[in-house]
Every structure is written in structure tokens, then in C-alpha cells.
Image (spheres, rainbow, N blue to C red):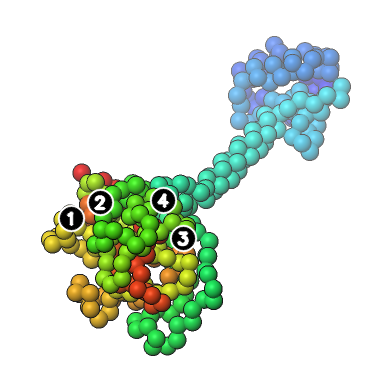
């Protein structure tokens, strides 16, 4: 190809005076195949911008399928269009990697004070991970009417709706007190040690008992999880959860869960159903209740009088 015979009509520059001067100065009248690749690329880089003219087309005879310009020598020269295609290809690949990485991190397992969960940062729905089931013996078959107010078995709730700042188990390692000063089995501290396996639990005496967590300061609480004992399938009765800034729970008490349907515990009748205790425990969704102390009540279970607690977790943020 010679510069004097470009693949265009009478005016290959499209009226671009600057381009015409550049062509006259930069393109030799002989075959461009004698120029090195570096020289050809330098010519393109130095070419003035013109939206109406394919400058690279003046320097080559044809365009192949990969968006390169084939020179008579057999070499190829990247055209502005071909270069753009490659750039867009790299950009597309990069954005694809960003999207894949985002979705991978979005489902990443996160540890938060003994709790492992995945987070949907868009909706705030925090999907929990739970310990595996460890039933001992034959699962109980609770017949109709055997336990009043028993909910139908269904897929357990697996997530909490939490604001970003409340996705920490603020009960982890906190001080635990109880209505039973000397537990029958275990230590009170095991209820907040971050271990949710049934091999570590605290067992209180029979009757109506409670354990209490001191969060050390007032928190805005959005969610609570509690596991009593899921080694044997059973139903814990008169389960009540309360929040207060008063350590004696005589004032400013907010009841956030109550399945005492007949009010026999003296804390009011509850609307929550009794439930079969499993490895999923029980999630209590709270819209935001302020308090420093969280108290958990129970009155034995359907198969015995023991009051056991494997782990309790409280999700919130310090209230300024």
C-alpha cells in the first residue's frame, strides 16, 4: 500500500487539515511494509484525532476478523477500532471479576463473637449458621393436645434483620447470674462462652428459674438467640425473655418473648407458641429495645424438670 493510493475517495482526510498535514509529513510515498512495528504504532499514536476518518485504514489494506490491520508485509497493526475492542474486552473481564468477587464475599462466612453468619448487606437480613443436630435416642412425637399451645413443626427461622452496627454478639463473655446460685451442672459462664455444642451447658434446679446477662452498658438490642438443650428433642415451657436497665427487673422491663400461654409464671400471658427445641434454638427478632440486662426464664421442659442453657447470644450496639 502506498500513501498516495489510500482505500478512500478523493479526500481521505475528510476535510481535516491537521490530518492532511500529518499524512503528508508522516506517511512516506513507498510501501509501509518497510517500517518497523514500533514505527507504525508510533505513527498511529501521533495521528491527530478525527471522528470521520479511519487513520489506520490509510496505513493498511484490509481489516481481519480480530480487529487488526494487515500490512502487505504480513504483519498486523492494531487499528484504533481494534484497540478499542481489546480495551473494552479487558474492561468487561475486569468488571466480571469484580462481580464474581463481590458475590463470593457477600456469601462469605463471618465470625462475630462465636456466631457464624452470612450477610446480605442490601436488605440487612443476616442469615445464621447453626450447629448440627445431635439428637440422642428416638425423636419425640408430641401428640395433639399433649402440650398446649405447641406450634406446628415447620422450617425454622434462619435469619435476623439487623443493622450493620448491631451484627455482633454483645453477650459474648459477659457476666451471667441466676436465680439458682449453685447450678446443678456446669458453670453459668458457659451460657456466654461462644460455644453452642451440647457438651457444654449449665443446668439449674427444677421449677421456674432464670439466667441473666449483664451487657456492661446499655445497648440497643435487635436480636436474641437462645439454645436450651437440643441433645434430646423436647419442649421448654414458660419461656420468657425480658430486657431492662434495672438489674432486679422491677422497672423499665420490656418483654420481647413469652410463650407462657396461661400466665402461670406471673409475667403475663404470652402470645408466642411453645416450640420443639432443636439445634436451631429460637431466634427472637426485636425492633430495637434499649437495655443493659437480658433475662431468660424457663420452667423445665416436657420430658423433665431441668432448666438447661447451652448458649445465649444478644445482637445490638452500645447506646450512647
Cα–Cα span, label 2 and label 1: 8 Å
The answer to whether residue 164 is visible is no
Residue 140: percent from left, percent from top: 49, 78
Disc 1 element:
loop
Q: Which residue is mark 1?
A: 247
Q: Which residue is mark 2?
A: 214
Disc 4 element:
loop
Q: In terms of depth relative to the viewer, which is nearer, 209 or 276?
A: 209
Name the residue at the top extreme: 25
Q: Which residue corresponds to the image point at 60% horizontal and 24% vertical from the top-left?
A: 49
Q: Which mark is residue 198?
A: 3
Residue 312: percent from left, percent from top: 36, 57
- Crowding at mark 1 (Cα within 10 Å: few <14, some 14-19, many 20+): some
Residue 225: percent from left, percent from top: 37, 60
Cα–Cα span, label 3 and label 4: 12 Å
Disc 2 element:
strand
The quarter of the rendered structure image containing the N terminus is top right
Q: Quadrant of residue 145?
A: bottom left
Q: Which residue corresponds to the image point at 19% horizontal and 74% vertical from the top-left?
A: 266
Left or right: 161, with 109 as reference point: left
Cα–Cα span, label 1 and label 3: 28 Å
| Label 4 vs 1, first from the N-terminus | 4
The answer to whether residue 199 is visible is yes
Cα–Cα span, label 4 and label 2: 15 Å
Q: Which residue is mark 4?
A: 194
Amino acid at each position: 500500500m502506498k500513501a498516495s493510493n489510500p482505500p478512500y475517495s478523493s479526500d481521505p482526510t475528510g476535510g481535516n487539515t491537521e490530518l492532511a498535514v500529518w499524512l503528508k509529513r508522516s506517511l512516506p510515498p513507498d510501501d509501509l511494509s518497510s517500517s518497523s512495528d514500533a514505527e507504525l504504532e508510533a505513527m498511529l499514536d501521533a495521528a491527530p484525532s478525527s471522528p470521520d476518518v479511519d487513520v489506520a485504514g490509510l496505513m493498511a489494506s484490509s481489516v481481519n476478523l480480530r480487529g487488526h490491520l494487515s500490512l502487505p508485509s504480513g504483519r498486523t497493526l492494531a487499528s484504533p477500532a481494534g484497540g478499542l475492542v481489546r480495551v473494552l474486552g479487558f474492561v468487561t473481564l475486569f468488571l466480571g471479576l469484580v462481580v464474581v468477587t463481590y458475590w463470593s464475599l457477600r456469601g462469605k462466612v463471618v465470625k462475630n463473637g462465636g456466631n457464624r453468619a452470612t450477610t446480605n448487606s442490601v436488605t440487612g437480613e443476616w442469615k445464621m449458621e447453626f450447629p448440627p443436630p445431635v439428637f440422642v435416642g428416638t425423636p419425640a412425637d408430641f401428640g395433639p393436645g399433649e402440650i398446649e399451645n405447641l406450634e406446628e413443626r415447620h422450617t425454622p427461622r434462619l435469619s435476623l434483620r439487623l443493622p450493620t452496627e448491631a451484627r455482633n454478639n454483645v453477650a459474648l463473655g459477659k457476666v451471667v447470674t441466676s436465680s439458682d446460685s449453685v447450678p446443678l451442672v456446669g458453670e453459668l459462664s458457659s451460657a456466654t462462652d461462644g460455644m453452642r455444642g451440647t457438651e457444654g451447658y449449665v443446668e439449674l434446679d427444677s421449677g421456674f428459674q432464670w439466667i441473666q446477662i449483664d451487657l456492661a452498658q446499655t445497648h440497643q438490642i435487635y436480636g436474641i438467640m437462645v439454645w436450651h438443650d437440643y441433645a434430646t428433642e423436647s419442649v421448654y415451657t414458660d419461656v420468657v425473655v425480658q430486657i431492662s436497665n434495672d438489674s432486679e427487673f422491677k422497672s423499665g422491663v420490656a418483654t420481647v418473648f413469652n410463650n407462657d400461654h396461661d400466665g402461670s409464671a406471673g409475667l403475663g400471658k404470652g402470645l408466642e407458641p411453645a416450640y420443639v427445641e432443636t439445634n436451631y434454638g429460637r431466634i427472637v427478632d426485636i425492633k430495637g429495645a434499649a437495655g443493659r440486662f437480658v433475662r431468660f426464664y424457663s420452667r423445665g421442659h416436657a420430658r423433665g424438670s431441668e432448666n438447661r442453657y447451652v448458649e445465649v447470644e444478644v445482637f445490638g450496639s452500645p447506646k450512647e
